[in-house]
Image (cartoon, helix red, strand yellow):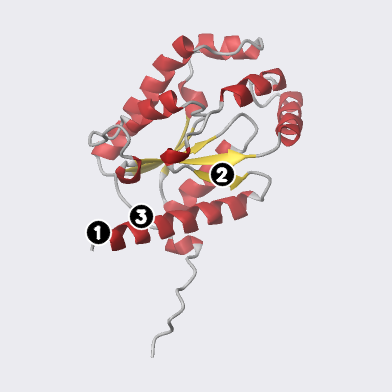
Amino acid sequence: MPSSDREVPTLDMAPKKKGEVIVIMGVSGAGKTTVGQMLGKEMKYKYLDADDFHSESNKEKMGKGIPLTDEDRMPWLESLRDATKEHIVNGNGVILGCSALKKQYRETLRSSDPDYKLGSYETSAVSFVLLEAPAEVLSVRLKKRAAEGTHYMPASLLQSQLDLLKIDESEGILRVDATLSPQSIVKTIIISIFQFQDSFHSSQC
């Protein structure tokens, strides 16, 4: 007789849904690149880093400790939208590491789904995972990164990003503790995706 207990999903059981974008979001130092790359490998999805899409002028501005404006960010977000739309249209899965701090920015990214209608978060091909950590932890990470010369983003811009980060609970964004190990974070994300898709498909029956 089959067990009545549901088997706990493992990393190998990650759903391979096609035409999907999973955005690993959060402020600098949250671990978006590390987690995004690991998640991409586990799910066999391509990984895109939003930092690679910034213009040189944006990078120079941030490097000088000057926060970007909405006007600075929009061409960047639109290029990310176009890049992820190509994957959705072609039926592929992609992981995007992107700050996506404001709902307005996330709506631009959601519009990469040709079928997306404003507010239809549950059926959107674009979903978001927020990596959260205390400001002190993030600051230490950014200072270490700056000392190693591995990123142009100075720790001085952290507070401006934290001030900008706004989450609407109706968006259903998955929040994950970014102080956990990257392996634990990835497993948490995959299990949550599995459970959501299982619940969604059951509701359609």
Amino acid beneath label 2? Val
The residue located at (23%, 63%) in the rendering is: 205
**Who comes first in sequence, dot 2 or dot 3?**
3
Between marks 3 and 1 in the image, the one whose residue lies nearer the viewer? 1
Of residue 2 and residue 56, the one placed in the foreground of this image is: 2
Residue 129: where, in percent of width, then height?
50, 42
Between marks 2 and 1 in the image, the one whose residue lies nearer the viewer? 1
Residue 152's quadrant in the figure?
A: top right
The residue located at (43%, 52%) in the rendering is: 43
Per the image, label 3 sits on a secondary structure element best described as: loop
Amino acid beneath label 1? Gln
Give the CA distance from mark 3 to mark 1.
19 Å
Q: What label does residue 92 carry, if any?
A: none
Q: Which residue is mark 2?
A: 35
**Who comes first in sequence, dot 3 or dot 1?**
3
Amino acid beneath label 3? Lys
Of residue 90 and residue 198, the one placed in the foreground of this image is: 198
Q: Which residue is mark 3?
A: 16
Residue 204: where, in percent of width, then height?
24, 59
Left-right relation of 53 to 146: left
Give the CA distance from mark 2 to mark 1.
31 Å
Please say if 17 is above or below 156: below
Please say if 201 is above or below 119: below
Q: Which residue is mark 1?
A: 204
In which quadrant of the rendered image does the N terminus lie?
bottom left
Per the image, label 1 sits on a secondary structure element best described as: helix
The residue located at (65%, 32%) in the rendering is: 29
Residue 113's quadrant in the figure?
A: top left
Number of numbered discs overlaid on the protein picture: 3
Residue 96: where, in percent of width, then height?
45, 36
Please say if 108 is above or below 133: above
Give the CA distance from mark 2 to mark 3.
18 Å
